[in-house]
Amino acid sequence: MPDADTAPRWTPTRIEDAPLVTGQGRFLDDLDPLPGTLTAAIVRSPHPHARIRTVDLSRARRHPGVTAVIGPEEVAAELEPFPLSVTTRMPYFPTGTDKVRYVGEPVAVVVASDRYVAEDAAELVDVEYELLDPVVGVRAALADDAPLLHEDQGSNIATDRTFTFGAVDRAFAEAAQVVTGTYDFPRYSSVPMECYSVVANWTDEPAGPAVEAWANFHGPFTMVPVMAGALGIPTSRVRLHVPADIGGSFGIKAGIYPYVVLLALASKYARTPVRWSEDRVEHLLASSTGADRMMRFEAAVDDDGRITALRADLADNVGAYMRPPEPSTLYRCYGNITGAYRIPAVQIRARAVVTNTMPTGLNRGFGGQQLYFGLERLMDDVARATGLDVVEARCRNLVPADAFPYETPTGGVYDSGNYEAAIRLAVRNADLDELRRRQAAARERGELYGIGLAAVVDPSGTNIGYVGLATPAADRKPGRDKSGSTEHVRVSVDVQGIVTVLLGSVPQGQGHATTARQVAARRLGLPEEQVRVVIEMDTATTPWTVTSGSYSSRFAPLVTSAVVAACDRIAGTVKAAGSVLLETAPEQLELADGTVRVTGDPGRSVLFRHAAGVVHWDPGALPEGTPARLYEEAAFAPREVRAATRDERINSSLCYGFVAELVAVRIDPDTLEITIERVSSVHDAGTVLNQTLLDGQVHGALTQALGGAMYEEFTYSEGGQPTSATFLDYLCPTTAEAGFPLVTDHVVTPSPLTPLGAKGSGEGSSMSFPAAVANAVTDALSPHGLAINQLPVHGTVLFDLLDGVRRPA
Amino acid sequence: MKPAPFAYVRPATLDDAVAELAATDGDGKVLAGGQSLVPVLAMRLGRPGTLVDINAVAGLDGLERRDGALRIGATVRQRHVERSSAAAAVPLLGLALPFVGHRELRSRGTVCGSLAHADPGAELPAVALCLGAALEVTGPRGRRTVRAADFFQGAMTTAVGPDEILTAVQFPAAGPGEGFGFAELARRHGDFALAGVVTRVRSRDGAVAEAVLSGFGVSDRPVTRDVTELVRAAAGEADVETALRPGTEELAREMVDTAGDAHGSQGYRRRLFAVLAARELARAHRRATESPS
């Protein structure tokens, strides 16, 4: 059980901020780790779908200043396809080899003296293409006569599985009514300020080839063996460094690993280290994006408005390749696919299709924004069908507060929560009654005004075993199961008593150092100034595992738990050393105020650093059995996170938080502009470790979700050409758009599974807010009988919808 | 996103600048604020052989009232005009400039650069058109003055020849009995407009003497109409804006001929144009009536 108090902690400043706001941040492009590094430019496909007929690199190779040029031939000859997460005949290399399958797909790499020369020479790479018909969108990919991206697969379907739990068909047969909805979730990203950046160096050593690389990659480190697999060398021969400063990612930079492999190969040919920094056009064309999803939900509803069974048919567009860790978008929320609701029976069809578009991957909320857009739109449709208020329709179906730990039909185990309390708090903070009065008055005037709600279970601490479900149980080899959400840390104390915490969490601005320092200082009874945190990653020296990295909101539940475990071992050694100086049994001692002191007799104390000094300077004095060791590595590997069962259930995350969000919108009757009038957002992240940072996560997630709900979308023409490849067309919300009235609040149900009771909460609102906005606009449009079943929603979308009503087809 | 190779010259006099440009034989581009040109170069959408940087050219940085007009030189930054007291003589500049990109862009971008670039979605070309601005163009054959009505010839296309430089623009100062309106709607603040309007109404002895409506973001160039009759007819109504709406809806069908895109269909842009035109013509009328004539 949690032993920290549950009062939130406020941090006036993050220790990360002063260097960043004074220009002292050192990002990868600022670093020059290897002398003599040359610069690469990447030649990319201008076509969405084409066969590569011939490639002529000779003109580019002859260009002055060019050291090496590699193309499809070198890639196919030297590299293995990346190991995929599921067996499918869709081989994936870091460039097109036989064909190109999206605009922006790498085709060749030019290594030159600088980026200008490299781009000049890139124009001299001659590729002859045979154009093929493109496939754009899930529906087109599934069409019977669709062109095939990967002919060997025989279809554009990369994976297609159906899972049934409980008596689904019977529940639908006996239902008082069935509510059905079809919802399309859009394709958008989180566009970090800093783009991808890689420095790679291939060396041939007596022991074999080795690759040393620097990248602003943040995990999951399962991708290290994937990179090694493509390079055809052991994982131990790949050394990856990640700098302390990364300018944001939100999951997007997990997609950088193919470039590490590509640049390593370029380095092999150039016989020199090579660097490449992605520019914004490259980023918007060809980095990574959240997956768009076509989905159909069906709810069997009884006379009381209770949902007795759910059917979910999900079809993700993963882009041109099923780049690992896809198809994880389908499975990340597997254990919580029934959301906040106690639904006993569920059927899931999980499909991923390939199309001639940028490959997909992690994006803040990963899999959650897609799922909850369908599920929470459906809940509003259930409310409408049953005549219940949207709050009441949900509350009737919630997992009740006394049901925790609650096991979902799909194997998720919700560790703690009080969903109804959170929804009621969100409603109260929003002053829903007053909003309803405003709405009534607006409708009297013939204006459009709507109120929307979304309630989502917010998973954190992913169990990487979920992707195993993409492979049928019968095909999963016994003894090769996968599970886990392990995190490692190392804590050490130097001769002056300064504590160093070494993290493998690879943050990109979240403030891990601030929080880790706070947790360690508190655990060791030290002022925070006596703790320093190191966040640079070096796979040769930082403790790591395949699950390391920054994703799935794992810092608060997992990393801090490992910090606690390591600090507790340090505390044991320091107390043992203190017992020598204080001539008291270690069990009588406590760590507080920078001292080791006798519990109940604080006057008898020695400084922490003096006790630590005994271990360094006079280890012979330590009690029998006390190791003279002031560095401790700890792994937090919760047993609740197990591999998928033979009957296809999995607890897909360690912790499950909660978000209840209420949004009110007003629509200008003339211009159809949507104004967000009020947002009330209530989060349950378990014990709040740091209120300032948590608020920052909520604000950030809301702003990114605002992008997906109303502004941002990767769009393609019918011919497969990207139509949003610059910031003129890919519209990220700015402060001018994000300044809506917001009330945030918290319900705290500590997790029983983490020592501090904390859960993750970096993503919650990115899952809930798009659905809440769509529900609010749908509510506003309800006098016209219109609904928002796809995003983003903005003026021209509303105009076209309303125009359709005025002029029925 | 690195430009193709180009030559760069930074002349100190206008004569030298004209000579340098002429020497490029049509393969040169004038660089002032660079807020549109540099991205075009970086994306290799344009690859001029020579950039003639006019920022050091003496005499192009003037901002002055002269002969009933505000004259703005080619290197005067948008932000400088926005903050200048002299610009009060042309109220429309004060209304429009805050919508030109963002403050950071305006601190480098020039008024003349925006006019010479002639993006169909840009604000300042429509202001120039609505006010009947005069544009001074200098080339090997000397200086000529082009009226705004003749200046904008299509998307990114103007009357400036390949060997000429837009050296200044003169916006007429507001006269007695004149009122103005400006509005645009964009997906986000700072974006090019989905539809934008600039309005000017001049009243004399309480009657509408002249009314002009200009639009941007709705065609391949800024467009303008004399709407004196329309405004005169609505002027007597209690609710001028509502009275104008049927007329502006008709004008929208005629003036908005852009095909539209994902940000705004043609139909939506027409609706926005009609709404904004009625609103801003009514506002200009109100201001004109309140202004002493």
Image (spheres, grey):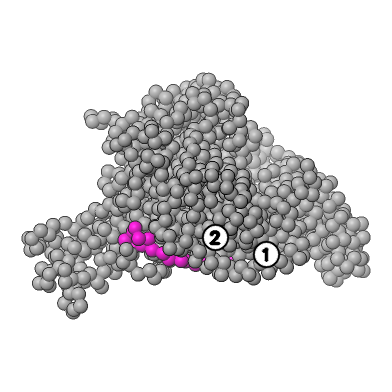
Q: Is residue A85 visible?
A: yes
- Chain for mark 1? B
Q: Is residue A358 above or below residue A146?
A: below
Q: Nearer the viewer, mark 1 or mark 2?
A: 2
Q: List x then y, in percent, for residue B79.
A: 64, 59
Q: Residues within 10 Å of mark 1 (few under 14, many from 20)?
A: few
Q: Nearer the viewer, residue B98 or A353?
A: A353
Classify residue B89 as left or right of residue A430: right
Q: Residues within 10 Å of mark 2 (few under 14, many from 20)?
A: some
Horizontal and vertical percent position of residue A598: 17, 74
| Front one among A734 and B199 | A734
Residue A330 drawn at (x, y percent): 48, 42
Q: Chain of mark 2?
A: A
Residue A102 among magenta residues: no
Farthest residue toward the top? A54
The magenta region covers: A737-758
The residue under label 1 is which amino acid type?
Ser
Amino acid type, residue under disc 2 in the picture: Arg
Q: In the rendered image, which residue does mark 2 sit on?
A: A396
Location of residue A131 by image quarter: top right
Residue at which label 1 appears? B84
Discs 1, 2: same chain: no
Question: Which residue is found at the position 83% from the left and 62% from the top?
Answer: B241
Magenta stretch mostly in which secondary structure?
Answer: loop
Name the residue at 33% across, 33% down: A477
- Residue name at image x 23 percent, y 30 percent: A207
